[in-house]
Image (tube, rainbow, N blue to C red):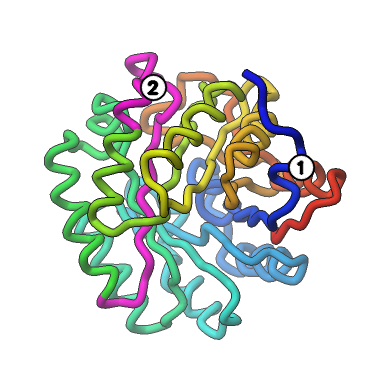
Amino acid sequence: MAYPGPESPVGQPVVVCECWPRDGLQGWPTVIPTATKLRVIRQVLDAGVRELDLTSFVPARTSPQFTDALAVLEALADRRPELGFRVLAVNLRSFDGIATAQAATGAITTCGFPISASEAHNLANLRRDHASHKEQLAAMIDRCGELGIEPLVCVATAFGCPLTGAVSPDTVLELAGWAYERGVRRIMVGDTTGEADPDHAYRLFTELFAALPEVRPIAHFHDTRGVGILNTWAALQAGVRTVDAALGGTGGGPRVVEENHRRGTRDVAAEDPVAARNSAGARTSS
């Protein structure tokens, strides 16, 4: 695959969303104190970060790391207007918690809703097939408008599934198109267990732009073979303007499914895309 030259992504600013507070910590073996989380969050904001994947509203029994979700949002309720704070909801009950938190703090700008391109992975991770999960997604997407929150649909396992192997790009595009028809414009394409390669990444994002002209995609790669930054750069070449990464490369796929698959998986280190862009003389909000 021949990519456009590096001038293609350099001409426009790129946002590197800092995912350490949520995706980075979701599988961390010990619960991080709220004060520690907030200290790191404020430090990265002071360093120039403009968007954070902040927390998750999920059952405490599965993710005790995020029992302080409301406290984190309350502490950041005075956010500056240019900052974006994402949260994650997995079902209607978790979205009820988000609605309560938004009423109390007004801090949430974006809510992410995951759906795996691999139906087997969706069943293992969220206990729902595509049809039943779409019903819940539709209800949550519709409620976002009432709360002043932008919906973000996250298509996971877009480049391969730890349970079933290859995933068809057509399935990814179908799910993205379903969300797009419901008014969603921010669509994340997620490499849940680090299956992607740069050619695959470039082609999939190119096809996404061709199919959904107003889409604002987010590239979310996990780094298992040292190619996470290459995949991120390929996505930028395709026209993506927001990429996910986490401090020090912490994080990885949800442990309920992936703990025995590619144990080396981690998020792309936030330092890497920033350094690569800076070396190319580009603008990065990170």
Mark drawn on residue 161: 2
Q: Position of residue 54 (x, y in %)?
A: 51, 61
Q: Residues within 10 Å of mark 1 (few under 14, many from 20)?
A: few
Q: Position of residue 25 (x, y in %)?
A: 54, 48
**Residue, x 24% and y 45% (percent of image)?**
178
Q: CA distance from mark 1 to mark 2?
A: 33 Å
Picture quadrant where residue 248 is located: top right
First along the sequence among labels 1 and 2: 1
The foreground one among 104 and 142 is 142
Q: Position of residue 220 (x, y in %)?
A: 53, 41
Helix, strand or loop status at disc 1: helix
Q: Looking at the figure, which quarter contains the N terminus? A: top right
With 78 as the anchor, is 171 left or right in this view?
left
With 156 as the anchor, is 200 left or right in this view?
right
Amino acid type, callout 1: Glu
The foreground one among 169 and 225 is 169
With 273 as the anchor, is 26 left or right in this view?
left
Give the magenta range: 146-172
Q: Which residue in the protein does label 1 denote? A: 7
In this picture, is 9 found above or below 15? Answer: above
**Residue, x 71% and y 63% (percent of image)?**
44
Q: Is residue 58 magenta?
A: no
In this picture, is 9 found above or below 91? Answer: above
Q: Nearer the viewer, mark 1 or mark 2?
A: 1
Q: Looking at the figure, which quarter contains the C terminus? A: bottom right
Residue at the limit of the structure toward the top, as seen here? 165
Q: Is residue 171 magenta?
A: yes
